[in-house]
Image: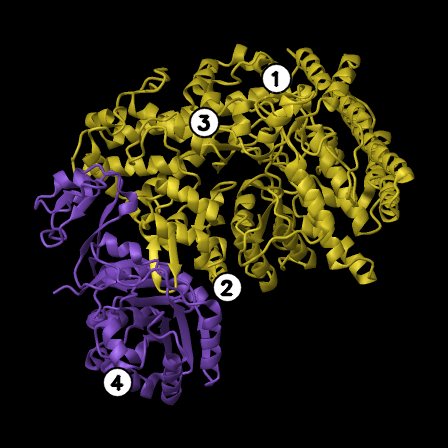
Amino acid sequence: MQTQALIFDIQDLSVQDGPGIRTTVFMKGCPLKCRWCSNPEGQLPYPELMHLNVLCNRTHNCILACPNKAVKSDDEYGAPVFDRSICRNCETLDCIESCPTFALKVSGKYITLEELIKKVKPNMPYYKNSGGGVTFSGGEPFLQAEFIRKFMDETSRFGLSVGVETCGMFDMDDVSGITEKLDFIYFDLKCMDDEIHREVTGSSNKIILSNLKHLAEKFSSKIIISVPVVPGVNDFAEQIKPIAEYCRKLGIYKIRLLPYHSMGEGKYYDLGREYKMDKNLSVPVKQLAVFKNLIESSGITCWLE
Amino acid sequence: MQKTREIKSIPSTDRVKLIRDRYLSEPLFIDSEYIKYYTEAHAKTDGFNVFERRAECHSFALENLTPFIREGELFAGSKTRYVRGAIPYCNYASRYILREFKNEEAEAQDAVTDIGEGGGIAKAKQIAEKSDFEFFCKKYLISKEDKQALKDSAEYFLGKSMQDVGDSLWRNIFEQAEYIDKGWQAGLYTAPHDPAPEGRYVLDFETALTQGFNGIIARLKDKIKNTEVTDFKSAEKIYFWRAGIRTLEATIKWAGNYAAKAEEMAKTEKDVKRKKELLEIAKRCKYVPANTPRNFRDAVQMFWFIYLAGHIEGAHLGYSPGRFDRYMYPFFKMDKDAGTITDGEALELLEILRVKMTEIEYVASFSWAGLGSGNLFQNMILGGLDEKGHRGDNALSLLVLQSAINCQTTQPTLSVWYDDSLSEEFLLKAIDCVKTGCGFPAWFNMKVYIQHELQKSNLPVPLIRKYAAMGGCTEPTMEGMSYGVVQAGFINHGKIFELAMNGGKDPRTGIQFDETPVPQNYNELYEAYKFHMRNSIRNWQRYWNMVMSAHRQTCNLIFSSVLVRDCIERGLSLDDGGAVCNGTPTTLSSGMVNIVNSLSVVKKLVEEEKFISMDELRTAMNKNWEGYEKLRSKAIAAPKWGNNDDFADSIYEDLFDTYCGYVSGQKNYLGEPYDPSMLAISTHAPFGKVCGATPDGRYATETLCDGVTSPFPGTDTHGPLAVLHSAGKIDHSRIRGGLHNMKFHPSTLRGIQGSKKLLSLIKTYFDTLGFQIQFNVVDSEMLRDAQQHPENYRDLIVRVAGFSAFFVELGKTIQDEIIRRTEHDI
């Protein structure tokens, strides 16, 4: 069988996904369902139809085009409404082709190993000159660990640097042989309190913490902890401090803070979902500076993104 | 309103702020003073030798210009009596001015050219309503007195202007004269370029600054003394040298007028400090340009006099200061070593210089004013190499960049000659300048230009390294040793394509050009395209050569000739081939990317998939895709230039080669092959407006592609690196010029990491022998435009802390949020 991955985007020139000029491959599917997630199209492990409301001209071509009659008109605004229980996400693409303003797209497509290599290999001069490479992000990239393993086997011949951004929720057995060869691992740590973690992500953090511990035993120097600072979840010292202490215990000395923002909100509606966060919340810059100092007082390098 | 960005732009002193704000609050004026005196002298010099007549007219006018020194200025010299004034050069073309008097539409294309309505233009309208000035030529104010003088001059030059003399030649002897007229009507060509044809070269500032005008005059006198007249050719040389002396002496006198003016102003000046400054200006204007500068301040004054006098002599576009940081550096270093100038003082001068260069305005036919966006394309290029091949950046280069960061004016455009050996400090400072969002510096690959110039002129490599400069927006030239009069104008690839599709008939106007078979398949279409491309290029070049033949007898540049090597040594003016390089004139076109994409669609849907026939496709184009939405979706999905996909890229490569071959197949008016070049300036919008739908998915009247190698907005679906791979496929050393735009949201370039990534990107693109790249770091204004016109910004990615999205796909409220954040530095 052909090795392929389900991705929802590939981006060149990412600044926040590791050193140098990087191509970030966004893998689709994630075991966590964080409320604040700003890339909700990365959560479900199958292609999904997105209706980009801002580009929609209300032509209703999609209503006529849909073979399953999954699209209806919202009487109040005339916007098409997609019944996700009927929509097949979509095998025929009829609605997408019918839209003159490109307001419909499928997020998520399968890409073969060969296709991805063909895409990134010509970029080698750019990676080489800048110390960059490829970063697998998501979603949770380790859900498709086999693909990453094979990708690294193929690309090590031309010296491609590969890094990963993970939510930490994966099976350690799946990643053996991969982690050794990665140049860096961005590892998310939301909070140490398991109860809160369950509530806001839908899962316990036990496996995450255990995975981090195992990885840190061998590769602590190439791990960078990402902490999304989310109002009402972990935006207080009592939550941040234990993270810093735990990292220091594991010999991890790099933490980056990602302050919550509500810019992902629109994508929830585009996907026909509900946004459960209060979009008016934000973390004051002063507060972030306090957390930064707090973390650095544990002897850890910390920066904001 | 000051936007908060990562790199802030604030004038370094209150003086600069005053001068800049004065510029920003001024409307545009037409000043007839120069042309009035010029006309007066012209009437008196009938029967003179052409060089002496031209020199006399210019010199007489220059000597009589009213000197203006404005509050705060530290060096003197103003092109007109107004802060923002333009000289109407009736000697080049006067019919368009008279047409304005009759309130006629200036050119057939004017109906489709938008000119800016904001800022100074809006203010000019207001002022005209309640003062003695009148609103003229759709964007200028003119006094009643000047208006009469302008009318007199314009009428005087009927039948005598370069345009009239040239037109009477080609309209009578050129068998393709009708083709040119049709081309203008159909929008195949830009409007006649006669009103402002000069430019695209750089004077030999280095020689002038090291010999002084007195030194050059002595050389000229020496030449006259040592030349025995034996035939008309040697006599012509004497005339030329004498004419040269006349212009140099007039320039010294003109500087002297400024000295007198400064002294007069000093007498009544109450402020002690300003009085001292005025007296210093007076002293300096008496000393330079006759003598060589004693210090950096002298050198700046002298540079400005030379630059401005050249600018006044001809109707220029793309006339540029060249490698300013190289030839000015010795004076700066001398002062720095002696401790007589601080970086801050030098910076202030450089910031003022920016405003002074922006103050120069031009007037041309309405169409061209819209096309050039009022931009004079003065290009100052920094960095590069010295003659030994070592890095050319220095402490002055850094200050020039800083001056552009501090004092954001549209002119001069900055560029960087890139080489790996340039210092990191210089490169990072240049990136800082990019990050201000001003759009420059543009980046040029030294290596590729050396290859081009070697193929073209076979000059010694050390010479190319040292004098490679930029003449105009993106066209390299050899500083102080070449002449590159602006070419006839642009050729519209979109229109050529329509002719090819429709048997040589323009669907918009119904005008029939050379008839070709209506194509029924890809090959026939491609052949027809090549036929019409070749025809339109060849006719355009031949037409322009005939116009330029009139240039010698009407507008031959004398002052500029004696300041370009080797005119003096050879005793030949620029028009007679006196310059070292005569191969710089280019033939320009824009919109090729749309054609490549259209051909790719035809190849895919007609040839390969047989999804549609050529006839059906033609119908779809004529109906502007109406009823063919599904076809349009398929067309949009077909391979496009800019995705590192050989299917489309190979079409570009082939078309590019063909184009270059056709262009250089014709000799220019200086006797050497024309040089191919591709730019867009603002032609892509008016050219798009006259074109119907094209198979690439473009609707009728939509703008064409804005660059040479940049993809059409929305068609690059494989990311910026794929775009660069495509752009790197063509042999950039074949053309003089090139343009590659990239748009970034500031979030992508944040911090020193972002700067270094951008530098790596430039370096690697140039490693693959790309020639030019420039960056738009979008600001909130552009994002608002993106809200209105999402189709032009489909590829714009916003990345914020883990979040990733295409800007145009975000909801309105989130777009607004991002605009807010962009204003406050994400």
* Neighbour tally class for label 2: few under 14, some 14-19, many 20 plus, Cα within 10 Å: some
Q: Position of residue B812 (x, y in %)?
A: 35, 47
**Are the residues under badges 1 and 4 in a single subunit?**
no
Q: Amino acid at mark 2?
A: Gly
Q: From mark 3 to mark 4, how far is it between C-alphas?
A: 71 Å
Q: Position of residue B464 (x, y in %)?
A: 62, 48
Q: Foreground mark, 2 or 4?
A: 4
Q: Colour of chain A?
A: purple
Q: Colour of chain B?
A: yellow
Q: From mark 2 to mark 1, how far is it between C-alphas?
A: 51 Å
Q: From mark 2 to mark 3, how far is it between C-alphas?
A: 47 Å
* Neighbour tally class for label 3: few under 14, some 14-19, many 20 plus, Cα within 10 Å: many
Q: Is residue B406 visible?
A: yes
- Numbered disc 4: secondary structure: helix
- Numbered disc 1: secondary structure: helix
| Disc sitting over residue B686 in the figure | none
The earlier-in-sequence mark between 2 and 3 is 3
Q: Is residue A248 above or below residue B524?
A: below
Residue located beneath label 3 in the image: B537
B38 or B815: which is nearer to us? B815
Q: Are marks 1 and 4 in contact (CB under 8 Å)?
A: no
The earlier-in-sequence mark between 3 and 1 is 1
Q: Is residue B702 left or right of residue A73?
A: right
| Disc sitting over residue A210 in the figure | 4
Q: Foreground mark, 3 or 4?
A: 4
